[in-house]
Image (cartoon, helix red, strand yellow):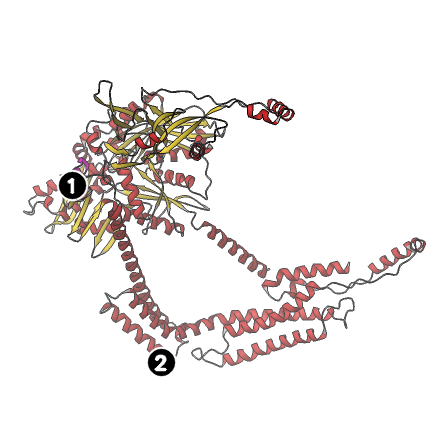
Amino acid sequence: MKQRLVVALIVSTLALLGSVQYAFGAAVMSIDLGSEWMKVGIVSPGVPMEIALNKESKRKTPVILSFRDGQRLFGEDAATVGLRFPTKSFHYLLDLLGKTVDNPIVKLYQTRFPYYNIEADPERNTVVFKIDDDTKYSVEELIAQILQKARDFAESSTGQPITECVITTPGFFGQAERTALLTAANLANIKVLQLLNDYTAVALNYGIFSRKEINDKAQYFVFYDMGAYHTTASVVSYQLVKDKATRETNPVVQVIGVGYDRTLGGLEMQLRLRDYLGKEFNKMKKTKTDVFTNPRALAKLFKEAGRVKNVLSANTDHFAQIEGLLDEQDFRLQVTREKFEELCKDLFERAVGPLDQALKNSGLNLSVINQVTLFGGSSRVPKVQEALKTFVGKELGKNINTDEAAALGAVYNAADLATGFRVSKFIVKEAVLFPIQVTFEREGNSGNTKVVKRSLFTAFGSYPQKKVITFNKNTEDFAFEVSYAELDHLPSNEVTNIGSLNLLKIKLNDVNSIISAHAGENIEPKGIKAHFVLDDSGLFSLSGIEFVADKNVTEQEEENAFAKLGNTITKLFTSNDEEKKEPDTEEKTPEEGEKAAEDGKKPTEGEAAANATATNETDSTASTEKKPISKIVSIKEPIPYHVDFLYAVHLKGDKYEEARKKVDRLNELERQIVRRESALNALESFVIEANQRLNEEEYASCATSKEIEELRKACADVSDWIYEDGQNADADTYEKKLVELQAISNPIYARHWEHRERSDVVNTFNKMIAHAKTFLTNAKNMTKESNSDKDIFTQVEIETLEKAINDAEQWVASELEAQNKLKRSDAVQMTVKSITDRMALLDREVKYLINKLKIWKPKVKETPKKSKKAANDSETTESETVGAEATVEEPKTVNVEQDVPAAADDQKIDDADKTDEHVEL
C-alpha cells in the first residue's frame, strides 16, 4: 500500500509540473496607477483575479521613486528616503505626463512642491526633473521605472514572466497624456493591451459581481471617485443587449456622462493642513529659520499632515507631533476636525460639482439613478459624504472595495483581451470627453477662402469607433488640421489645463498626379477619403488616405490589374470581422453629390439552364452576338501624406533610444545591487550557521578536531573581513568567499548526511531482500522440475537469483559491521551510493524474472480429430472429463502483495498475476 502511495505521489507531481509548464507566459496583469497609490491585479491559469503583494506583503504601494548614492528605491523605502532627501524623491507624477512646462497643472505642482528643480526639455518643452548637472529624468522615464516595479510584483506573485497589461488612466486624459503613458510602458517593456478609464474599470468590476441583476431594461448608476489628486463622477448604464450578428445576448456597461475636477482631492486637503501646521510652527518662534524654506522640514510636515488627515476621518481631534522638525526643535499641536473642515471649506463645496456635471452631460436626473456609489480614498472624509448625501437625498452606496475595484475590473478586461483565457463576455462602451473635429480651408464661389469644420467624434459619443471624411473638391495638394471641437460642456478653467487644443496637421502630396492618372470618360471621381480611428484606449489616429473613383466597364472589357487589386482590397476592408464592429460613418461636405450605381442583374438557376441549352443548339458564332453588360468597378489608390503632431511632442527617435538606455542601465544596476546583497546575505548566513552547527554534537562528531579548528578559523577570518575591508566588495568576491568556505565544510556536512540517511536506506534494502526471497520461494514452483504445467523459469535462473540475494545479505551485514567500527569523523565506508548500487544489482535480477513471468503463455495441447458421429457419441464423456478436470486441485499461485520487489513494479506484478489466473481456467 505504501508503495502504491509513492507511485500516486509521483504521478500527481508530474501532473502538477505539466500544469505549471502550461501556465508559463499565460498570466496577465493590470496596473491601477494612481497619483498616490498603485495596485496590481493578476490573473493566471488556476488562479482567480487577485491583487499582487509587494515585498512588504501589502496590497497597495506608494507611487514614489527615490535615488540615493546611485541606488534606486520604490514604495515605502523611497518614502523613508524622501524625508531626508526630498529633492531626490519623486511622487504625484501621473498628472505631469504629456504636459509642457507652461501648463497650469505644472505650475500648480511647482507651487505645491517648491523644492523640486524642474526644467523644460530643450526639444519637447516637457517636464524634466534635474537632480544634478549629470542626472536628469523625464516624467516618462520615472513612470516607466514605476511600471517596471509593478510588473516585478506581478511576476513574483505568479511565479512566471508577464508582458501583457491593462493600465487604468484618468478619463480626462487627452491624446498627449495617453500617448506619454504608452511611451512609458514601452520603456518598461510592457505590452499594453488597453488603456482603460479608471471609472470604467470600477463600473466593470461592479457589473461582473452584479451580473444576475442586469436585465433588458437599462439601469443607471453613478460612481463617484475622489482620489488623491482629482475627483470624477461617471453615469453608467447596465443592460442586456442582443448582438444582431452573433445573436448572442451579453451585458453591456456604457458610460453616458462624466464630470470631473482635476485638482480636487485628498492631496489638496493634505497640503492645506501642511501649510497650517507650518504656519503654527513659525508662530512658536522656536527657531529663526522659516520652516517653508527647508525642504526636509516641509517633507516632514507633509507626511504628518497626511497622517492627521486620515485620523480625523474617524476622530474629532488629534495631535500632530514631529520630533526634530527644524533645528532639532520638536513640534506638537492639537488639530480638531472642525479646524480641518474650516481649512478645506471651499473644497467640500466643490465636492458635488463633478456629480452635477456628470448628470447634466448624461441628460438624466437623480430620480432615475439607482445608486450613487463611492470610490477612492478621499471619499471617506465625513464632510465629503455629508455634502454628497445632501445633494443626492438618499444613502450613498459603499458596496465596492474602495481601493481595489479599479485594479480588479482592469485585470478582468486584461484576461478578456489576452489569449489563453475564456471569460464571460461583458461589453464595455466608453464615452468621448473631448470631441474631435477636422478643419480645412476651401475656396468659396466668390473666390474668398473659408474655413470649414466637420465633426468626427462628438462629445459623449461611444468609442471605439471609426469615421471617414470625404474631400470632393480638392484636386491639388492640400492640408487639413485635427483639433478638439467645442468644449462648452467643461468648466471654464479646464480648457486651459488641457493644453494644446490642436492635435494633428496632415499634408497630402501627389494629389493632382493621382487624380490625373485615373481621369477618363468612364471614370467618375468620388473624392479623397480620410479614415480616422478612435481605438479602445481612447487614442486618435489617421489610418489612411485614398483617392476613390467609380469606373464603368463592360463584361468583355478586360479589367486592369489595378482595378482587380482595388476590388480585392475593398473586400478585405469589408470583412465579416469589421462588420461586427462599430460601423464606419462617412461625413461628407454639403456640395458632394451621391449617385447610386446599379449592378447587372444575375440570372436565376432556371434561366441559366435555359440559356445553356439554347447555346448548345445554336451556331457557335451566336456567343459573339451577346450584348455587353456594364458594371461599376471601384478604384482606390492610397495618397501619400505627412503628419505633424501639434500637441506635446512624443518621446521618439534618438530621444526615445536614449531614454530606453537610461532605464535599462538603472535596471541592470538594480539587478547588480540585488545580486550583491543576496551574495553578502548568503555569506553572512553561512558563517553564522557553520558556527552554530559546530556547537552541536550531531555535526561536531562528524569532523576531526583539525577540521573543526580549520572551519572555525576560516569563518572568523571571513566575518572580520566582511565588517572591515569587505564592506564595499562586489558580488563576485562574496560568492568566491562562500565557495572557499563550502570547500572546507562540505566533507563534514557530507559525513553528517551519510550517517543521517544510511539507516533509512539500509532498511529499504532489507525490505527489498525480503520481498525478493518471497518471490524466489514462489518462483521455485514455476520450474519444469516442480510443475510441468508452469515451465516458466530455468534452474539456472533460480540459482542466479538465489546467489544475488545471498550476496546482498552478506554484503549488508559485512559493510554494516565494518562501518560500525569506524568513528563518525572517519571516512565513510558504507555510503548511500554504494547501497543503492547494490540495490540496483538485485533489482535487475528480480525484474528479469518478473518480465519473463509477465510474457509467459502456456502451451496449447493438440486434440485428435474425430468423426461427427464419434463427436456426438463422446459429448457426454467430454463434458464429464471437463468436470473432472475442474475438480483437480489447483497449483499454488503467486502471492502478489508479497512478491513486489520495489515500488516501481507494483502494477507489473499485478498484471502478471491476472494472466496466470486466466491460464488456470
Of callouts 1 and 2, the N-terminal one: 1
- The secondary structure making up most of the magenta span is helix
Q: Amino acid at mark 1?
A: Gln
Q: Is residue 463 visible?
A: no
Is 512 in front, or is 372?
512
Spot the residue most to the top: 446
Mark 2 closeness class: few <14, some 14–19, many ≥20 residues within 10 Å: few
Vertical position of residue 321 compared to residue 546: above or below: below
Magenta-highlighted residues: 102-109
Q: Is residue 18 magenta?
A: no
Q: Amino acid at mark 2?
A: Lys
Q: Which residue is mark 2?
A: 706
Residue 194 location, x and y as percent? Answer: 36, 39
Q: Which residue is mark 1?
A: 110
Q: Please state, as top left, top right, bottom left or bottom right, where the C terminus lies in the image.
A: bottom right
Vertical position of residue 598 compared to residue 704: above or below: above
Residue 792 location, x and y as percent? Answer: 73, 68
Q: Residue at x 46, y 21 (%)?
A: 598
Mark 1 and mark 2: Cα distance apart in space: 68 Å
Q: Please state, as top left, top right, bottom left or bottom right, where the N terminus lies in the image.
A: bottom right
- How many callouts does the rendering have? 2
Vertical position of residue 371 compared to residue 671: above or below: above
